[in-house]
Amino acid sequence: MHLTWLTTAALLGSSLLPLAVRAQHPAPAEVRRYVIEVAGLRVGTMTATRQPLSAAEVRYTLVSDVQVSFLVYHLKVYYKVINLVGSDQLLLSTVEAHTNQGNFASRTEWKGDHYDIVADQYKHHYRGTLRQPIRYTVTDMFFRAPTGQAQAYGEYFGDYFMLSPAPGSTYRARRDGREDEYRYADGQLTTIIKKNPLKNFVIRWQP
C-alpha cells in the first residue's frame, strides 16, 4: 500500500512538473514593426517590443533607425528606449541616441518616493525630480491607445506630452510647441505623424 502510494505520487509529480515549469516561463514577446517615411520615401524603421518578465514586471523596448538626405539636409538618428515597468509603474527608463550631431542619453529612475530624471539630448538638457508615479509613457502608446489618459511621459525629454483626442480614433500629443498625431484602428496603433518644419515624418505599421 505504501509503495503504491509512493509510485502514484511520483507519477503525478512527474506529470505536473512540466506544467509548473511552463507556468513560470514569461509570456512570449509582442513585437510591432513600423516603417518611417518622409515625402513618401522610406528612410528608416521602428520596432516596439513588449516582453513580460514575470507576473508583475514588463520590459518595453523601442528602437528607431533613421537616415535622411535631402539636398543639404542630412539626418542620421539611431535611438533605443528601454523601460522597466513593475506593478503598472515605470521603474527605470534609459534612452540612448546616436546621431550625426553626437551621442546623447536620458535616464528616469524610481528611487522609492521620487524619480531622478536626467535628459541630455541634442539641444535639450534637463535635470529634475518627479514624485508622482509614471503609469503611461510614449512607448506605451504603441501597445494601447491612451483612452482616458491626459498625458504620456516622454522618455527622451524626461517630460510629459499632453494628450487630446481628435476625430477618427486619433490622439494629438503636444509638448513645447511640438505636435505629433497617433492614429489607431481597432485598438492598434497604425500611423504616427511627427510634424517637422521641413517635412513630416510618417511612421506606418507593418502588420
Image (tube, rainbow, N blue to C red):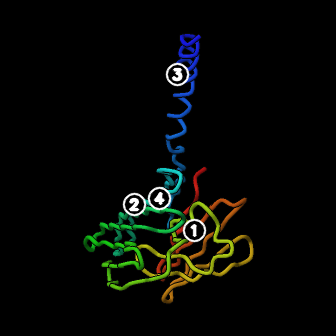
Residue indicated by mark 3: 14
Per the image, the residue denoted by label 2 is 65
Counting from the top left corner in percent of width and height, residue 103 is at 26, 70
The mark lying in front, picked from 3 and 4, is 3
- Whichever of callouts 2 and 3 sits on the residue coming sooner in the sequence is 3
Q: Where does the image place residue 189, in percent across and percent down from the top left?
A: 62, 62
Please report whichever mark, 4 or 1, sits nearer to the chain's N-terminal start.
4
Which quadrant would residue 111 be assigned to in this image? bottom left
Q: Which residue is mark 1?
A: 192
Crowdedness of circle 2 by 10 Å Cα count: few (<14), some, many (20+)? some
Q: Which-is-in-front pick, marks 1 and 3?
A: 3
Name the residue: 58% across, 16% down. Answer: 5
152 is higher (above) or lower (below) than 186: below
**Residue plotted at (47% across, 59% down):** 60
Q: Is label 2 in contact with label 4 (beta carbons under 8 Å)?
A: no
Q: Earlier in the sequence, mark 3 or mark 4?
A: 3
Mark 1 residue crowding within 10 angstroms, few (<14) / some (14–19) / many (20+)? many
- Amino acid identity at mark 3: Ser
Disc 3 is placed on an element classified as helix
